[in-house]
C-alpha cells in the first residue's frame, strides 16, 4: 500500500490539448533543442519579441475585411470585437486567435493531421502514425466537403482562416516568429477551414475516443468472463441521480446522419462469397455466416498491441477522465430568475484550453470561451441565454474483430462474403530524419489498428463528418430554449450535456450527439466483425437525455449516468460514467440552500467535501471501534471522528482518509489482480488500482454498506474475512505511510503537505508553469483533482451566470492562465491568481464591456 501511494505521487498525465507539445519542447527531442533556459521570461530569446509587451493602441491593416472592425481589450487582456458584418467578425476572431495563440493552434492541427514529426523529429512519429491511422484529418476533409459553401459554417471557417493568415503574413514580413519556429527553422503553413475542423477533431478525440473495450478484453481474459462481467457491469452498482429520470419513450432507431469518413464503403467494391459469386452488400448477415472465434487469448493479444502503442502517446489520444460539472436552478429560491454554473474539467495548461472574448456583429452578440483554432464561442452567454457543457460519457467507440484468413491476407469476411481491405498510403515527414512511409487499412467498420492476435478495426463516432459548427453558431445566436434545442439537432460528436439558463427564468439540460446502437452483442468488449453486431443507427434526437423546467427547480450534470435503468437505449457501461459523488454533493448543497445566488454557486464550485467519505466513514469508524489500536492509530482515528469530510489542504483528516481509501481499494482488489495476473502495465489508465476504476469504486461502496461479507473481501485461497477486517488492515497501512512521510504526530498530517496542484506550461519547462502549490480536493469533490498526490487536472474554466427576474445578467468566469501563449507577456498567466483563490472575473457582452483600456482598429486592406 505504501509503495502504491508513492507510485501514485508520480502520476502526471500529459497536458490536455496542448499536452502533446511536451514532446516538442520539454527537454529537447530529436533535432529540436531543449528550450527551458531559452524560454525564461524576461530573457533569452523572448527579450525583443513584440508580444512580450502589453499591447497598446493600434491601427492594423487586415486582408479579408470588408470594413473596419473595432477591438478593445480590458487591462487583463479580455478582447471585445465589434464588426459590421458576420464575416468581418470571424476574420477578426481568427486574427486575434493567431496573434495570441498561434503555437497552440499550429501544434493542435499538426497533432490531428499527423505532422508532428515534421516539427520535432523522430519522437513525433508514433503520434503521427496513430493519428493518420485513426483519421482525424480525413474526417476534417470530408466534413469540409459536406459543408454547404453558402451556409454560415463555411463562411465563418473561411473568414476565420483569412484572419489567421493575416497574422501569418505579418510574421513573415516582420520576422518575429514564436521561438519554436525560430529555433527549428520550421514555419507554420497557411491556415484553411480544414485546419479548424482538424482542431475540432482533436478536441472530439480527447472527449470521446475510448479504449475501454480493449481494457475489458484484458480483464475478461485474466479475471475470467463471469467475474469481469459482474465487476464491470452495464448498470452501476451504486445509486445514481440522473438529471433525466423519465418516463422515457422508445422512438425506435434513427439513422446516423453522415457516413463514416474512415471506413471502406460497402458499395465501393464487390464482395465475393467463398465460391466466387457476388455478394449482396445490402442484405443482413446470413445465419450461416462463419462465427468469429472470440478466444480470450487472441482478443487480449490484439488489445495489448493497440494499448501498448497508445501508451507512447499523450493522454489526449483518448478519453480517460470524466469531465466537468454544470448545474442550473430557477424558481422561488432563485428569486424567480435562473442561475447556471459550469466548470469543465480537463488537464490544465498554460496557455489555457480557452481564449475568452466577446463578439458582436449583425448576427451575433455573444461572450465566453472560444477554442483557439475554431470560430464562435463554445461555452458562454449572450443577451438572452447562457450555457455550459459536460461530457455525456456515452460509448462512442467500438472495436471489431475482423475475420481473416491466412490464404486471403488482404481481405476480411463481412456479411457472408470476402472483401478487400481498402488501403491508403502516407509519407510522414520527419525533421532531421528520413520520411516514414505508412499504410492504413480500412474495413467497413473503420481503420485497422492491429493484425496481431486478431485483426481489429475501430468504429468511432468522431470519424463521421458533422455540422457541429453550424449547431454552435445557431446556438450562439439563440434567444430561448426552443432555439437552443433546435440548434443542437446538428450536433453529433462528442455527445455533450448542454446545461441551459435564460433571462426569463427557464432552465434545462439536453445531451445531443450520436449514440450508436448495435444490432446485437456485448459492446463492453470487442465485437465480431462479420456483420451481426454492426452499428445500425442512433438514438433519435427527441429521445436523447433531456429535461426542461423540472418541478424540483434543479438540474445537475456531473458525468453521472444521465438516465435511469429503464432507459430503452444502450448508452454505455457503468465504467464509462462518473461514480456520482460530485452529483450527490451538488444536489445536497442546492437542496439544502435557502436561496440560490451567483456567489453561492461560485462557492460550491470550490467545494472540497468528499461525499464518498461521508458515506463510508461511519463504516470505517465502526470497524475501528473495538480494534486494538496503537496510540498513534488512536490519534488518527480520533481525527477522523471529528472530521467533516472536507478535503481541505489544512486538514489531517483528509490525508488520513485519502491514504486509507487508496489502501482499502488495494487491500480488497490487489490479491485478485495478482492471482489473475491482470496486465496492469499494459494499460495503467484502465487497470491500475491506484486510479480506482469507476466500476470497482461503485462495487466497493455497495458491498461495504450493504454486503460486508461479499466474497470479494476474501483474497483468493485465503481465510474468509469481512469488509471490516479489510478496512482495519487498510487503516493500519495508511497510518504507517503517513508516519513515514509526515512524522509521528497525526495532528500535523495536513493534506496539503502531500497533495499539490500544478498548471504545466505548453513548453513543458517547469519555470513557465504555475505551481505546484499545496491544494485541497480529490477525484470525488466538486473542486476535482486527479487521483494522485500531484494533480494537473481540474477546472479548466469556471463560469457562473445569474439571471435576475428582470432579465439582467450577473456573469463571471475565470481560467488558470491568461490570454497569451507568450511566456514573457503580462497576459500569460495574469488570471491564474484569481483561479487559485476561486474568484471569478466579469464575463461581459461587448456593450457591457464598453471600449476597454486598449483600442485596436482593424482596417480593410486597400
Image (cartoon, rainbow, N blue to C red):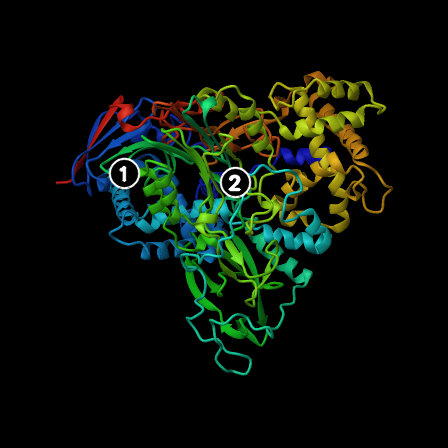
Rendered residue at 64%/35% (across/down) = 8
Q: Are marks 2 and 1 in contact (CB under 8 Å)?
A: no
Q: Disc 1 marks which residue?
A: 95
Measured from the top left, where is residue 757 in percent x and y? 55, 28
Image depth: mark 2 or mark 1 in front: 2
Q: Secondary structure at mark 2?
A: loop
Q: Secondary structure at mark 1?
A: helix
Pointer 2 or 1: first along the chain: 1
Measured from the top left, where is residue 830 in percent x and y? 40, 24
Measured from the top left, where is residue 121 in percent x and y? 44, 49
- Point out the residue furthest to the left here: 862
In the figure, 772 relative to 388: above or below?
Answer: above
How far apart are the alpha carbons under marks 2 and 1? 41 Å
Marker disc for residue 244 = 2
Residue 362 horizontal side relative to residue 30, left or right: left
Residue 10 horizontal side relative to residue 557, left or right: right
Amino acid at each position: 500500500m505504501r509503495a502504491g501511494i508513492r507510485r501514485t505521487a508520480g502520476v502526471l498525465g500529459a497536458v490536455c490539448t496542448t499536452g502533446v507539445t511536451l514532446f516538442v519542447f520539454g527537454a529537447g527531442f530529436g533535432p529540436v533543442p531543449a528550450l527551458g533556459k531559452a524560454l525564461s521570461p524576461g530573457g533569452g530569446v523572448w527579450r525583443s519579441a513584440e508580444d512580450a509587451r502589453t499591447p497598446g493602441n493600434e491601427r492594423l491593416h487586415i486582408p479579408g475585411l470588408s470594413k473596419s472592425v473595432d477591438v478593445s481589450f480590458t487591462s487583463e487582456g479580455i478582447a471585445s470585437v465589434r464588426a459590421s458584418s458576420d464575416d468581418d467578425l470571424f476574420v477578426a476572431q481568427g486574427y486575434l486567435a493567431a496573434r495570441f495563440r498561434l503555437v497552440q493552434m499550429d501544434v493542435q492541427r499538426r497533432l490531428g493531421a499527423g505532422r508532428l514529426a515534421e516539427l520535432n523529429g523522430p519522437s513525433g512519429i508514433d503520434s503521427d502514425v496513430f493519428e493518420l491511422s485513426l483519421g482525424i484529418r480525413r474526417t476534417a476533409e470530408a466534413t469540409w466537403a459536406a459543408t454547404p459553401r453558402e451556409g454560415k459554417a463555411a463562411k465563418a471557417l473561411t473568414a476565420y482562416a483569412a484572419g489567421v493568415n493575416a497574422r501569418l503574413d505579418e510574421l513573415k514580413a516582420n520576422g518575429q516568429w514564436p521561438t519554436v519556429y525560430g529555433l527549428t527553422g520550421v514555419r507554420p503553413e497557411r491556415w484553411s477551414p480544414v485546419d479548424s475542423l482538424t482542431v475540432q477533431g482533436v478536441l472530439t478525440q480527447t472527449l470521446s475516443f475510448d479504449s475501454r473495450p480493449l481494457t475489458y478484453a484484458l480483464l475478461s481474459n485474466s479475471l475470467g468472463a463471469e467475474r469481469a462481467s459482474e465487476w464491470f457491469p452495464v448498470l452501476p452498482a451504486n445509486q445514481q441521480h440522473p438529471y433525466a429520470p423519465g418516463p422515457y419513450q422508445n422512438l425506435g432507431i434513427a439513422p446516423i446522419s453522415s457516413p463514416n469518413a474512415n471506413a471502406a464503403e460497402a458499395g465501393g467494391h464487390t464482395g465475393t462469397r467463398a465460391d466466387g459469386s457476388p455478394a449482396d452488400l445490402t442484405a443482413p448477415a446470413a445465419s450461416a455466416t462463419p462465427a468469429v472465434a472470440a478466444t480470450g487469448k487472441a482478443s487480449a493479444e490484439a488489445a495489448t498491441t493497440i494499448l501498448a502503442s497508445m501508451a507512447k502517446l499523450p493522454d489526449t489520444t483518448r478519453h480517460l477522465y470524466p469531465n466537468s460539472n454544470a448545474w442550473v436552478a430557477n424558481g422561488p429560491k432563485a428569486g424567480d430568475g435562473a442561475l447556471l454554473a459550469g466548470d469543465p474539467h480537463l488537464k490544465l495548461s498554460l496557455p489555457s484550453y480557452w481564449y475568452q472574448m466577446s463578439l458582436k456583429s449583425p448576427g451575433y452578440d455573444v461572450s465566453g470561451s472560444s477554442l483557439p483554432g475554431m470560430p464562435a464561442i463554445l461555452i458562454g452567454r449572450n443577451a438572452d441565454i447562457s450555457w455550459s457543457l459536460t461530457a455525456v460519457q456515452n460509448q462512442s467507440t467500438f472495436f471489431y474483430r475482423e475475420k481473416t484468413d491466412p490464404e486471403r491476407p488482404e481481405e476480411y469476411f463481412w456479411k457472408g462474403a470476402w472483401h478487400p481491405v481498402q488501403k491508403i498510403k502516407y509519407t510522414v515527414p520527419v525533421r532531421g530524419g528520413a520520411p516514414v512511409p505508412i499504410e492504413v487499412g480500412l474495413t467497413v467498420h473503420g481503420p485497422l489498428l492491429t493484425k496481431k492476435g486478431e485483426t481489429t478495426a475501430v468504429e468511432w463516432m468522431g470519424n463521421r463528418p458533422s455540422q457541429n459548427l453550424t449547431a454552435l453558431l445557431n446556438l450562439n445566436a439563440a434567444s430561448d430554449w426552443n432555439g437552443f434545442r433546435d440548434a443542437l439537432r446538428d450536433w453529433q460528436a462528442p455527445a455533450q450535456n448542454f446545461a441551459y439558463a435564460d433571462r426569463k427564468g427557464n432552465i434545462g439540460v439536453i445531451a445531443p450527439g450520436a449514440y450508436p446502437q448495435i444490432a446485437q452483442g456485448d459492446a463492453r468488449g470487442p465485437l465480431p466483425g462479420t456483420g451481426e453486431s454492426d452499428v445500425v443507427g442512433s438514438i433519435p434526437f427527441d429521445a436523447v437525455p433531456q429535461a426542461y423546467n423540472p418541478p424540483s427547480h434543479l438540474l445537475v450534470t456531473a458525468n453521472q449516468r444521465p438516465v435511469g435503468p429503464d432507459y430503452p437505449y444502450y448508452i454505455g457501461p457503468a465504467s464509462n460514467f462518473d461514480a456520482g459523488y460530485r452529483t450527490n454533493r451538488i444536489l445536497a448543497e442546492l437542496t439544502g440552500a435557502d436561496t440560490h445566488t451567483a456567489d453561492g454557486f461560485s462557492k460550491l464550485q470550490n467545494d472540497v467535501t468528499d461525499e464518498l467519505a461521508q458515506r463510508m466513514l461511519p463504516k470505517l469508524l465502526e470497524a475501528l471501534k473495538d480494534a486494538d489500536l496503537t496510540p498513534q492509530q488512536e490519534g488518527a482515528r480520533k481525527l477522523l471522528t471529528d472530521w467533516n469530510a472536507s478535503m481541505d489542504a489544512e486538514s489531517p483528516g483528509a490525508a488520513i482518509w485519502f491514504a486509507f481509501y487508496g489502501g482499502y481499494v488495494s487491500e480488497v482488489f490487489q490479491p485478485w489482480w495478482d492471482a489473475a495476473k491482470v496486465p496492469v502495465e499494459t494499460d495503467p489508465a484502465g487497470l491500475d488500482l491506484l486510479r480506482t476504476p469507476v466500476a470497482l469504486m461503485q462495487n466497493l461502496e455497495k458491498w461495504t454498506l450493504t454486503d460486508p461479507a461479499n466474497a470479494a473481501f476474501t483474497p483468493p485461497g485465503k481465510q474468509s474475512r469481512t469488509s471490516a477486517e479489510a478496512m482495519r488492515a487498510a487503516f493500519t497501512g495508511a497510518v504507517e505511510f503517513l508516519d513515514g512521510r509526515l512524522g509521528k504526530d497525526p495532528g500535523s498530517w495536513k493534506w496539503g503537505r502531500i497533495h499539490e496542484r500544478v498548471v504545466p506550461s505548453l513548453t513543458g519547462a517547469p519555470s513557465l508553469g504555475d505551481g505546484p502549490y499545496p491544494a485541497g480536493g480529490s477525484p470525488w469533490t466538486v473542486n476535482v483533482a486527479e487521483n494522485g498526490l500531484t494533480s494537473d487536472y481540474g477546472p479548466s474554466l469556471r463560469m457562473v451566470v445569474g439571471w435576475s427576474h428582470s432579465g439582467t445578467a450577473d456573469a463571471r468566469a475565470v481560467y488558470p492562465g491568461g490570454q497569451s501563449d507568450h511566456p514573457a507577456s503580462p497576459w500569460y498567466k495574469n488570471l491564474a491568481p484569481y483561479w487559485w483563490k476561486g474568484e471569478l472575473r466579469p464575463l461581459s457582452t461587448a456593450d457591457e464591456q464598453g471600449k476597454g483600456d486598449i483600442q485596436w482598429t482593424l482596417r480593410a486592406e486597400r
